[in-house]
Structures are given as structure tokens and as C-alpha cells.
Amino acid sequence: MAENSKIEWCNHTANLWWGCVGVHNGCTNCFAELLAKRYGKEVWGIDNPRRMIKNVWSELKKFQKEAEKQNEVHRVFVGSMMDIFEKPKSLVDTYGKPLLEGENEFWNTGQLRDKFFNEVVPNSPNLMFLLLTKRPSNINKYIPDSWKESPPKNVMFGTSPVDQETANKLIVQLSKVNGQRFLSVEPQLEKIDLMAKVDDETEIVLLDLVDWVINGGESGPRKRPFDTDWGRLLREDCKKKGVPFFFKQIDKKLEIPQDLLIREFPENKIKTLKK
């Protein structure tokens, strides 16, 4: 959990559990995986259970109270240490003890996700939840049925393309989800053309399918190179299409060029915050 997150495009981060498994090239230097290994937490991979984050529910309530008091909408990134649309996995508690069916309130990640969707989201009108996934094809499988027709105004669904191949695939999958959508193009590993057509039958381009683009390079000792001209291309395309563009970083060390110091946010779709 992180209050006043160091991630520039959100106010807070929230994780229902800790653990995941990589799905594409952008996962190679995953910070959350490296951190888990450093602390000896066996929560990564297909077969390992995920670690439940017990205090997330009280933290989310606190975030909502603070935002309501300030009459603001605060952005909450879910989640930096997990993928909320990963298929259900078994759970362990804080001490690594397995949580078993019949003995505990929760015993798999799907149950935590359902609690979040059904109890937290509708009771957090001052929080904008940014649900970022590398598995957008799973979104419609796991969201409540009611969301498919009437998506919550305080949720944005996002995905993380890192090259042209993942952009072509993941953005189209994301477009099948009804609601507000965003891209976190980080770490960007090659030039990406978001003006590429979705298919040969229409004039729709990839950028037409999203409401916000976040962009940046990779940080850390194993960082892969980032060309600032890649960011400039996305910046100009977003400008043409009227899509808010947020440039996060080159590598956390190199200074961002003045022309890329652009940090735009989508308009909050929540108009009335107080009852």
C-alpha cells in the first residue's frame, strides 16, 4: 500500500494481494517480482500462491474519507504488486500460511477481487480506480455483469503495451470492455505507432480506442534504452486526437526534456462528489 504514491500519475496505490507471473517482454525487469525475491516471498509464477494484503480494506476507506473531506477525486492505481485480472490463485496470509477453503473468509484471489468490485468501488465515489492489467482479455470475464452494460464512472480500465506487437493485440482486447480506458506505455521498448489502423475494414486507429495515454521508459539497474523521440511521436499523435498525454520518465535519472514535460489527466467523469 502507498499513500501519496511516488508514481506520478496517481495519488495512491492499492494491492489486494502480492504476486503475479509475467506475460510479455515488458515484465522482464518487473520491480514487484524483484522485490518479492529480495524478501524471499515465493509469490511469483504460475504455481505459487499469492500473499493477501490484509490492511488494504482499511486503507481504501481512509483514502475515500480523505478525498471526500477535500471534495476531490483521488486516483488509485490497482495494483503495483499484482494484476487484478489474473485468473484466481490460491492465497497465503502475511506469515505465509495457506488460506484454506472452509477455514477462512478468503482462500483465493478471485474472492478478494469480487469484494473490491462489489463493496469498495460503489462505496468510493471520490476515488478514481485505475485498474491496470497486462491481461485485458480477462476483464469481461471477471467484472460484475452489471458493469458490462453500465460501467462505474469511478473506474478506468488500462493495459500496458510496450512494443508494436503488444499494442496491436492488447489495445484491441481492451476496446472490448465498456467504460473509460487508458494505456500505460511503459516501459516502452521500441517505436509504437498508435495511429495504426485497427483492421483493414475501418478507419479506426488504435488511439481512437482509449481516453488517456501514460508513457515512459524503464528504470533500475537493468533498464533497457528509451528513445525520447518515441515519446514525442506519442505526444504528437495524442495532440492530434485530443487524447490527454502524460509523460512519466526516461529512466528516473535522466532529466526530462522540456518539450516532454507534459502531464495531462483525463477529465474526471464524476461531476457530483457530495451527497
Image (cartoon, rainbow, N blue to C red):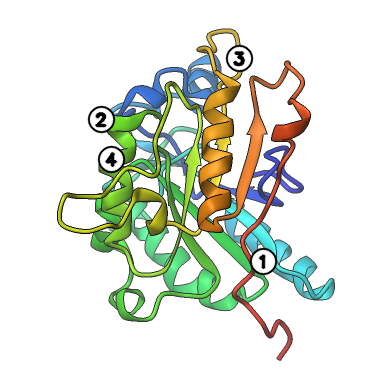
Q: What residue does disc 1 label? A: 61
Residue extending furthest toward the bottom? 275
Which residue is found at the position 36% from the left and 75% from the top?
Answer: 147
Q: Residues within 10 Å of mark 3 (few under 14, many from 20)?
A: few
What's the amino acid at mark 3? Gly
Residue extending furthest toward the left? 201
- Would residue 105 be visible to someone looking at this image? no
- State left or right for residue 142 relative to residue 55: left
Give the CA distance from mark 2 to mark 1.
31 Å
> CB of mark 4 within 8 Å of CB of mark 2?
no
Q: Residues within 10 Å of mark 1 (few under 14, many from 20)?
A: few
First along the sequence among labels 4 and 1: 1
**Circle 3 — which element?**
loop
First along the sequence among labels 2 and 1: 2
- State left or right for residue 209 relative to residue 130: left
Q: Which mark is residue 168?
A: 4
Q: What residue does disc 2 label? A: 46
Residue 144 in the image, given as x and y percentages of width and height: 32, 72
Q: Residues within 10 Å of mark 4 (few under 14, many from 20)?
A: many
Which residue is found at the position 60% from the left and 14% from the top?
Answer: 220
Q: What residue does disc 3 label? A: 220
